[in-house]
Amino acid sequence: MLKIKNLYATVEGKEILKGINLEIQEGEVHAIMGPNGSGKSTLANVLAGHNNYKVTQGEIIFEGKNIFDLSVEERAKEGIFLAFQYPVEIPGVTNYSFLKTALNEIRKQNNLEEIDSKEFMDLLNKKMKILDMDDVFIQRSVNQGFSGGEKKRNEILQLLMLEPKLALLDETDSGLDIDALKIVSNGVNVFRNKNNAVLAVTHYQRLLNYIVPDFVHVLSKGRIIKSGGKELALELEEKGYDWIKG
Amino acid sequence: MSEKDNKIIKDLTDNEYKWGFVTDIESESFPKGLDENTVRLLSQKKGEPEWMTEWRLKAFHAWLKMKEPRWANLKIPPYDYQDLRYYSAPVKKEKLESLSQVDPELLKTFEKLGVPIQEQKRLAGVAVDAVFDSVSVATTFRESLAEKGIIFCPISEAIKEYPDLIKKYLGSVVPYNDNFYATLNSAVFSDGSFVYIPNDVECPMELSTYFRINAQETGQFERTLIIAEEGSYVSYLEGCTAPIRDENQLHAAVVELIALDNAEIKYSTVQNWYPGDKEGKGGIYNFVTKRGICKGKNSKISWSQVETGSAITWKYPACILKGENSVGEFYSVAITNNFQQADTGTKMIHLGKNSKSTIVSKGISVGYSNNSYRGLVKVHKNADNARNFSQCDSMLIGDKCGAHTFPYLEVDNNTAIVEHEATTSKVSDDQIFYLNQRGISTEDAVNMIVNGFCKDVFNKLPMEFAAEAQKLLSISLEGSVG
């Protein structure tokens, strides 16, 4: 599904990614772990196409297509979804209209008609139940006044509604207490199927107790320096990142 | 709601000012210039009684001694008031008996503008007074309104048919010598709407006036007078457009509202005068005086405005809260793009005990434009327990535009509570990225963010107007993101 070949990227002239190689197949969950400043979030943002990040070398092939020239929204419509570390607030725009607009953009891409209101509400209620979200949420402004946990839940709700092919989770566990972590992780597990994939970027191993990865990659100074199975995460937790860097 | 808006927005993306056409119609107009004779001639043309002519002349002489106000945060080029025609009207064949006798060109014009002046095509029960240049060309639903005792007619007719009401109320809220533009209007106003709602009548439909400037080198000076008797209610809508022309055209209107005991007037405007082109050439000068008086106890006046047009806007809809427990409201969205300038806001004058006012102003500046909020809250010494809440928010799109807030507070009663909140925000790149990442284009994203910003005000607009306002907003925002 995703092939990253020798990827270099800079932000404000500073090279952050220095030759990333990674391949993700349908049905897989990959975790990218690494110390602060190793380039984890940069990788997620580069894949999403953020303007502040410049790809200077290498290729990103998504579903057999080089996405270098695709804009952020085109990539989104192709099925790349980024669950934000810090979701932004959009005052005055209800979650309802935001989610419906986004869903219809994706549907349009897939030559589907706009979803009717009844069908949309049924779908939304179903997904909200998975995340234990209250009804009032629908009419609240996007992320405005949300607690850290609510914002993260909202990200996963969008994931469940939009059903992308590839979910990039950027530090989705940060700022969550254990109950919220379980709910959010459960949401991601509900999303998972044999046709989609997850790339979870995380500093801590604890997320991976709930979203069990097939592969774990350790990122350091812009390079993947070690890859392994889920047990690698546990080893890291125990020994710290210095173990691997040394 | 929003997915529909976005569709509308998409439909309109290749549009600039789409109301900029000119109607080819034979019209009769005065030569350029303004003197005492012009005023007399105008009054005569309209078949006015002597007292009206005298009133106009009094205003004209006062005007001669006045100067244009220069305190606003606006750059107004010198304007030659002699280089203007003060009357232009489509030539009438004979006296009109019914709408079917209205010139088909005129009907077509209003049809093109989406204004329902043919009653059979009634839209959500809105009665319309259509004003074309200096005259009212059609007023719909007059008979059915008359059954309830409601008067809805061109003001030129009201002067002849209801002289007592006109004498009593015209100039009672905005005196003939109020300010430069209002005084000019008092001297030369040509038409406008007159509304009278009798005791305890709730007006069964929205009343609406649609103003259209068509003729070249002509000013539009309309006058609106709305009287809501005790216990009555009326919701009034005002819309306006003009053709695209290179020169700046003057629009100097006066609106007076009078609400008696327990009466409520809701006045909504979607101002969409031609704003000038991208280089700032042409466009309407919109210098308007709007004022309402809550004369009776428990009366209420609510102004809602969406200001998207005009090259320059100078406008401060005001409420004089004279009655005990009276309520004044002002909800405003003002958007300026390219080289537009707006200095707009409100005045809330608290005279009565327990009077309350709410001000919510949303200013959006785009391009090279300049957008100022100017508001006065004045609490008179007798206005015990007066309350005001003001919220003034500005949003900037790009870094070449300006947003300014000038709140004035004059409080002479220490039981009054006056609150003022102000914010300035930008459409942030993070917000755009977030929405883009959900498959929403940048243009739609900006529209969504700005619509959200204006939501508190849009919620106050009548239904059809809210949709219209959102459409206009998207057009005004066009090209705001590169």
Image (cartoon, rainbow, N blue to C red):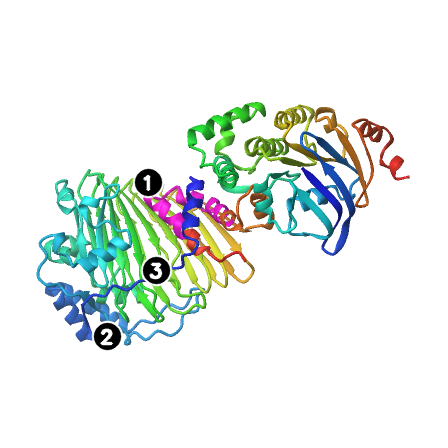
Q: Chain of mark 2?
A: B
B124 with respect to B148 (left or right): right
Query: Disc 2 residue type?
Result: Leu
- Mark 2 lies on a secondary structure that is loop
Alpha carbons under labels 2 and 1: distance apart:
44 Å
Is residue B173 in view from this perspective? no
x, y percent for residue B179: 31, 64
Q: Nearer the viewer, residue A2 or B32?
A: A2
The answer to whether residue B451 is magenta is yes
Residue at 53%, 44% in the rendered image = B440
Q: Are marks 2 and 1 on the same chain?
A: yes
* Pointer 2 local density, CA inside 10 Å: few below 14, some 14–19, many at least 20: some
User: What residue is shown with label 3?
Assistant: B273
Farthest residue, direction right: A246
Q: What's the distance in space between the residues labelled 2 and 3, CA to CA?
A: 24 Å
* Residue B177 pos. (x, y %): 27, 65
Residue B34 marker: 2
In which quadrant will I find the C terminus of chain B? bottom right
Badge 1 is on which residue? B325
- Mark 3 to mark 1: distance in Å? 36 Å
Residue B339: x %, y % from top left: 45, 65
| Label 3 SS | loop
Residue A176 inside the magenta-drawn segment: no
Of the residues shown, which amino acid type is indicated by label 3? Trp
Q: Amino acid at mark 1?
A: Asn
Which residues, given as a range, are shown in magenta? B446-472
